[in-house]
Image: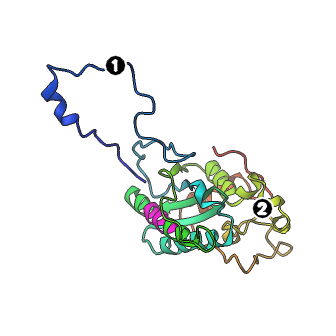
Amino acid sequence: MNGMGRVAPEADQLTLFEDKPKKQRGGKRRGAGRPPRGAHAGERHKKRPVHRAWHPVHVVLRVVKEIGSLRRRRAYLAIRAATRLASRRDGFRIVHISVQRTHVHLLVEAKNKTVLAAGMQGFQISAAKHLNAAIIIGRPGPRRRGAVFPDRYHAVVIDSPRQARHALSYVINNWRKHREDRGEVTRRWHIDWYASGAMFPDWKERGEQGFALQGPPELPPLLVSVPRTWLLTTGWKLHGAISCYEVPSPAR
């Protein structure tokens, strides 16, 4: 998470041996170097771009396969507990969140780059702690220990009304993209109760004839903040209302 590239410990010593370089055989050793930390690891550790307070960010966090599906009550409540902690951080807001089987989507706002990094770090630490506490190895057995997120988060800056509209639909309707809306129980849902769609006030279908926003009692609503950026309050509306039945296209 937010790791910086490191300098090899022998770098400062190379000048001591320049006149007698060690002969090497063959090319680069197979399997040498830092191994990947998971099937989805690989987010490059390049410097994050400068963050501006008026630009929301779409964040994707993937979990290790040992965690299992996040679309279970215990895992869901663990993620929800982490959103509670994030809501207390000044200048950092999780506006929307979607919990899928192997990953989590978030739309966040932050007043600067430092606050964004600290907010995401705090959320990941809290989510990892609660997820490990929720998972029991065997029955009975010890609680899980170890890493939860295999690599640093993937972030896309939202800087236009069209992109904001796509990001909103992509996050709160993401379950339809993964066909989670076709289950025996979920096919009766209008919105995904593993996401924060219940907190979205601008569904195309809402109104006098709209659906009732009352989810399963075992899945209390996720804790998110009201957006403050123009892009997520007003700007996205320039490109049309969002239907709860939209199937999002791939992320742009």
At which x and y percent is residue 243? 78, 59
Query: What is the magenta segment's predominant secondary structure?
Result: helix
Q: How is the image coloured?
A: rainbow
Q: How many marks?
A: 2
Check residue 120 for magenta coloring.
Answer: yes
Which of pointers 2 and 1 indicates the residue nearer the eye?
A: 1
x then y, percent, for residue 72: 68, 68
* Residue with the mark numbered 2: 244
Residue 168 is situated, as x and y percent measured from the top left of the image, at 65, 57
Q: Secondary structure under badge 2?
A: loop
| Range shown magenta | 119-127
Q: Give the Cα separation between the discs numbered 2 and 1.
A: 61 Å
The answer to whether residue 90 of the structure is visible from this angle is yes
Q: Determine the residue positioned at 43% across, 67% down.
A: 91
Quarter of the picture containing the N terminus is: bottom left
The C terminus lies in which quarter of the figure? top right
Residue drawn at point x = 80 percent, y = 76 percent: 212
Contact (CB < 8 A) between labels 2 and 1?
A: no
Q: Which mark is residue 129?
A: none
- Give the number of the disc on residue 25: 1
